[in-house]
Image (tube, coloured by chain):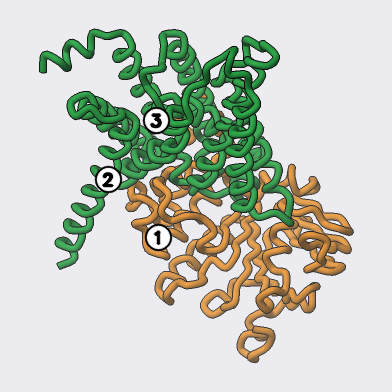
Amino acid sequence: MSGDLVTLDGVTAGYGGNAILRNVDLHLHEGDFMAIVGPNGGGKTTLFRTILGLIEPMEGEVSVTGLSPSKGCVNIGYVPQFGSFDRKYPVLAEEVVAMGLRTRQSLNPFSGRDRDSVRKAMEYTGSLEFARKRIGELSGGQLQRTLLARALVSRPRILLLDEPTASLDPEMRSGVYDILRDASSDGITIMMITHDLKGIEDDVDRMVRVDRTIYEVTEDPHGMVCGGGVL
Amino acid sequence: MTDIIAYLSIPLIQNMFMATVLACVLCGVIGTYVVVNRMVAVTGGIAHTTFGGVGFAYYLMSVYAVSWMTPMIGALIFSAVAAVIMVVCKRIDELREDTVIGSLWAVGMALGVVFMCYMDRSVIVPSSYESILFGNMLLIDSGKLCIMAAVTAVILAVTAFFYRDLRIMTFDVTHAKVSGINVVSLDLILHILIAVTCVMVANVVGIVMIMALMTIPAAMGNLFSKDLKGTMLLGTFFAVVLSVLGLFLSIGINTPPGATVVLVIGAVFIVMLVLRKIVSSGHAE
C-alpha cells in the first residue's frame, strides 16, 4: 500500500450530458486486488471508461499513476467485456496479443524482443498452444486467456478487467482466476468488474459496490460473499 | 483465338486490362478493410456521391471553361468530402450512420443529374449516364492509366504505413483508443482511402458496381485466410484472376466488360460458398 495508482475525487461522469456516476471518490492502492460489483446500468463500465480516459468527467478529477487518464493509461492493461469486438475478424491469437505492445511503430517490424514479449505473455496465460489459431476458432476460455495476454504483454502496473468470466463455465473461470492470482502475486494491481466472486473471493482484498455512486467499500469481501451480502 | 490475340494488340484493350489489374489490387487491399470493418454501406454511399462530382466537373468545364476540373478530379473531390462528412457525423450523437450514408448517396446522385442538366453540351459532350454508372473501360486512355498507377502506389504506401494501427482500430476500437491511437484521424484516413479507391474502381466497372469489386474478392479471401494480410493477398489474387477471366469472356461473347467481370466474380463467390457449406457439413457428419 505504498501509494494510490488510480484516484477519483468527486467525479461525475456519463454520456451526452446525462450523469451515470455521481460524486465518486475512489482510491486504488498499489497492490490492490479490487472487485467492482453492482447492478447492470449502475455505472461500473462508465467508471472504467473514465479511468481509461475514454470519457471526460463532467466534474471532479481523475489521475492514473499521477497523470491524466489519457497519459496514465499506458500503465493500464485492459480486458474488455466479452463480445466487444468482431470474432469473425481475420486475425490470429498471437496477433491480438501483439496489439497490446506499446513499442509498435507503423513501418518497423516487431523486434525480436517484442516477439519474445508476446511469447512470454502467451505462456503466462496458457494461450501459447493456440497462438496460430484464428480468433473466431477460440473457445470462450481461450479467447479470454488471449485478451489477458494482450493486456499483460506491455507489463502494465494496473490491470482493468470488465467481467472477464462472464459466459465462461466453472472450469474456464477457474483458469482465468488462476492467471489473475499469479498477476496479483507478481505485484500487478487489479481492478475487476464482476457479477460473481465465487472462486476468487479469498484473493480479492477490497470490494466496491457501484450503483450510480460508490456505495460501499469493504475490506472483507469473503465475509460479504459468505453472508449473502452485496452480490 | 486469333480474334482475341488481335484484340489484345489494341492499345485501348491493353489499357483496359492494366486498369482492371490496378483496380483489383486496390480492391483486394482496401476492400479487405471494407469487409472486415462492415463498411459496405459506407462504400456504397461514397461511390454514389462521386456521380455528383462527375456532373460538377462537366458543369465547370463546359460553362466556366475550368479545364483542370476533369470528371475524375470532380469525383475525387466529392468522394473525399463525403468521407469527411461521414466521419464528422459519426461524432454527432443525434445522427445515425446509415441515415448519413443514405442521404449522401441520394444527394450525390441528384447533384450529378442536376449539374449535367445545366452543363453546356455544345462545348463538351459528356460520357453517357450508362458509361458513368456502369463503366466503359474503353474510355481509359494512357493518361488516365498513369494517374491510376500513381494513385494506386500512393494508396498502397499509405496503407502499409498505417497497417498495424488500422488493424487494431478495425478489430477493437476501444483498445485502439486506450493504446493512444488517434482513432478519429485514422478513421478519416481509412474513409479517404476508400473514397479514392472508389474513384479508381469506377473507371473500370462504373459507379453502381464498385461495391461488387470492393467486397466480393475480399470476402472470398476471408473465407480461406486466417489473418488480415492473407485476406488482402488472397482477395487481390481472386480479384485479378476473375476480372481478367471476365474480360476475356466479355471479348469472347461480346458483352459489356464491367458487368461481365462482376457477374464472373459473383458466380464464383456463390460456388465457393456452396462448396464450403457442402464440405463443412461433410466434416460435421
The one of B284 and B131 positioned closer to us in this rendering: B131
| Residue at far bottom of view | A227
Circle 3 packing at 10 Å, graded few (<14), some (14-19), many (20+), is many
Amino acid beneath label 2: Phe
Amino acid beneath label 3: Val
Say which chain tag 2 marks: B
- Please state which of the two labelled residues, at mark 3 or mark 1, is closer to the viewer: 3
Is disc 2 on the same chain as disc 3?
yes
Amino acid beneath label 1: Gln
Say which chain tag 1 marks: A
Question: Is disc 3 placed on a helix, strand or loop?
Answer: helix
The residue carrying mark 1 is A142
The residue carrying mark 3 is B205
Question: Is disc 2 placed on a helix, strand or loop?
Answer: helix
Is disc 1 on the same chain as disc 3?
no
Q: Earlier in the sequence, mark 3 or mark 2?
A: 3
Q: Is residue A20 visible?
A: yes
Question: Is disc 1 placed on a helix, strand or loop?
Answer: helix
Circle 2 packing at 10 Å, graded few (<14), some (14-19), many (20+), is some
- Please state which of the two labelled residues, at mark 3 or mark 2, is closer to the viewer: 3
- How many marks can you see? 3
Q: Do tag 2 and tag 1 residues touch (Cβ < 8 Å)?
A: no
Please give the name of the residue rendered at 19% of the width and 29% of the height, measured from the top-left corner: B253
Vertical order, B181 against A76 (above or below): above
